[in-house]
Image: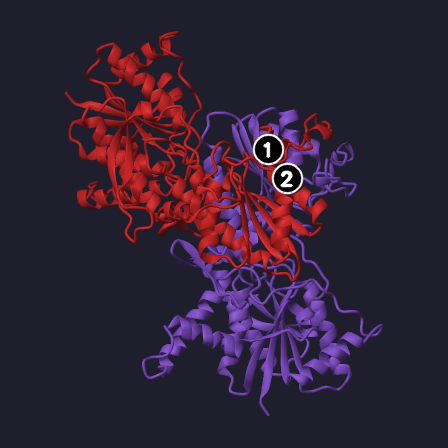
Chain colours: A red, B purple
Amino acid sequence: MKKNLLVAQSGGPTAAINATLAGIIERAFENPEIEHVLGADYGIQGVLQEHFIDLSVKIPELALAEIGGVDQNGEVDPEALDGGLMRILDRLSTTPAAALGSCRYKLKDPGVDPSEFERIIAIFKKYNIGYFIYIGGNDSMDTVWKLSQYIKSKGIEDITVVGAPKTIDNDLYGIDHCPGFGSAAKYIATTISELERELLVYDMPYVIIVEMMGRNAGWLTAAAALAENQNARVPYLIYLEEVPFDLNEFISDLRAEMSVHKNIIVAISEGIRDRSDKMICDYGAENRPKDAFGHVIASGAGKVLENAVKSNIGCKVRSIELNLLQRCAGHLLSRTDIRESRALGKNAAELAFAGKNGCMSTLRRISALGDAEYKVVYDSVDIREVANKEKKVPEKWISSEGNGVTQECINYLKPLIQGELSCEFEGGIPKYVVFR
Amino acid sequence: MKKNLLVAQSGGPTAAINATLAGIIERAFENPEIEHVLGADYGIQGVLQEHFIDLSVKIPELALAEIGGVDQNGEVDPEALDGGLMRILDRLSTTPAAALGSCRYKLKDPGVDPSEFERIIAIFKKYNIGYFIYIGGNDSMDTVWKLSQYIKSKGIEDITVVGAPKTIDNDLYGIDHCPGFGSAAKYIATTISELERELLVYDMPYVIIVEMMGRNAGWLTAAAALAENQNARVPYLIYLEEVPFDLNEFISDLRAEMSVHKNIIVAISEGIRDRSDKMICDYGAENRPKDAFGHVIASGAGKVLENAVKSNIGCKVRSIELNLLQRCAGHLLSRTDIRESRALGKNAAELAFAGKNGCMSTLRRISALGDAEYKVVYDSVDIREVANKEKKVPEKWISSEGNGVTQECINYLKPLIQGELSCEFEGGIPKYVVFR
């Protein structure tokens, strides 16, 4: 009997998560045993609420519109439709943020409360779902883990649950690097290269501080080193979340560099903390009472450092928070990242069709760091190795001064940002695939 | 006798100011009467300090390196070198920020103190400079005006001073729109389209507030309407600097939209003020004492609005300041803007060679707003019409509710962002022309 495949997206969006979705759809459409590909609206919450988008209807609809509809006889050239279909999947691959919608929802432990699991299985049976692929980060892999174990414990053999990775944070175990990270890293390195051009415009001491996402891992901040490695005309000071941050040492690092150079780039993780584990972004917060609206004006670590530079060095300084821009820049993607993200989606579908319940689609780098040729293979990994863990930048990849990364780290990062890819534009504005 | 041409850049950098520089160099290299093209290091300050870069040496040097140096016989194919030269000028055209460096320096009134003018003329004579082109905004055009008048008043006939426009603010008189603005507007519209994808990811009320540059004119903020016009699935509320801002009206605008839609994009100018002319970014500042470093944490208008939404609506809200990113994004340029910026540079050189002292290179739109075909012609304008004035978004282009722009405004803006152009990339990272 033919089965349906259900796919959902979860966690924070990325610029590549839809490429993985496109890969899953592409592979599922090729499988004659799959009747419908359903997308859950807003992650596992959409599953629980039975909110589904029938992608086996929606994608061909979009493809038909793409090729200009039916001809005068009300017919469609199947080859043209296939071409339109591939154009829609390519466009979906460069559409940023989760096209199906996302959620941050952790299922309860089935040992404590199995009701949600019972409900999910009932819904799967109701909609004839044989395969469920969940695209997400470490929290979402917890959902895959719990669900796959529940299915196993109940002796259910006709439902396979597989995870597909994504996160700009690059903090997943069980994979060489995370889909979505390469595009964010490319955006960061490019933007910092541009900011360095800005930095050098005036003939005066000037410090630009750039704050990257990453509460618990400094991978995105490390990407600043890619700009430094290849383009830099000025010193870079790079402070990762992995190293305890000391404001006095920062000022003395800066003074040392500024005794030789007028202009400095500083790259920091939003989550930098001091030795007592206090967030730098919370410095001075006790001196800030609630404002007219009853809220303390929240400010990032970059603002705190900006003020420290003003007070201690007294030069021109500006802090810039890359904020959401670093994870949704569909106009500046890493071609490598989008290719791999789509392949990871195809691989996830293949793992599901092979009945590999409880695994995550993964890639392994088979070339050595620093090799001229970069090569990966696609594989699977037991979901237990991935769920609920965070991979940090290893200590050996951080410079002994704690304000930069090593060449080995650069060798790891560099292949991930190779090749440029942009979303489509129409009339000067991005053109996306939008499901609702 | 052959003469030298001197060019300098001034004011805030843009993503297109080097395209104008490239146009000037290109045209000057074609003129056999020009011996050297000199670039002043850091604007008029570099002139006063006699800090020059000899671009007639530097550009061919870069071109020679580009084509791989001399051949085995120590010779160079002149055609290959010409090709290399054009590649360098093309790369310069997509290099963001002022490659020659910039300054914010206003010459003293020559009626009060002519010493700087005497010095500049002496330097021009010393370096055999027959033509001086200053690329800048309204303040820089003041320099062009004063200098050209001083030259005239002294009966000097062998020096011609011409202005070339630039500013992302689009606030110059005497020109249909400013070079640099189109690329910034394209960056803004693209980025807001991307943020709208982010906005729709979660199934909950969510407001994203985007803050654009523009202390005194709302042109950049109006560019948000380009995303709204073509892509928007959610309501946009757009508040320009030209309209007095009322926090209560903002909350009621938002409530009205949110009674129908969960998600809203808000676009604001950094310089929005209330009816008493108080900057919105200064709201609540009196309640914020100095922090640990002796500084009030400066926050933009976006943060103030974010807090107001938190307090009054209580939904998820995030404010994003586009900051320097909107003016240095060499990886996302408007092809129209870069083409026009370069043509304005060529035109400035031609005006200089024609001895048109005291004018600015300009363009006029000869197609009507809303025409399918967009057309401009290049011309000159008396510098008095430009210097020290600021052109605001006209009232008739702002919606009667004061929270959007009219179709006519969109018709004005839309042609300026057409066509995509990116800086070159090498090894995944931008490749620029750098003079020092």
Q: Residue at x 44, y 31 (%)?
A: A12
Residue depicted at x 74% and y 82%: B152
Left or right: residue B54 compared with residue B193: right
Residue type of the residue flagged with mark 2: Leu
Report x, y in % for residue A292. 73, 29
Q: Position of residue B356 (x, y in %)?
A: 64, 80
Q: How many neighbours does mark 1 have within 10 angstroms: few (below 14), some (14-19), or many (20 or more)?
A: some
Q: Check the image and name the residue furthest to the right.
A: B112
Disc number for residue A352 = none
**Residue under label 2:** A247
Residue A254 location (% of width, % of height): 62, 49
Position above or below: B313 against B410: above
Q: Please say if B55 is above or below A278.
A: below
Report whether B44 appears left or right of A387: right
Q: Taking the image as drawn, is residue A42 in sight?
A: no
The residue located at (63%, 59%) in the rendering is: B12
In the image, residue B269 sits, relative to residue A290, either above or below, namely below
Does the residue at mark 2 contact the one at mark 1 (Cβ under 8 Å)? yes
Find disc 1 in the rendering and name its residue.
A274
Q: Amino acid at mark 1?
A: Asp
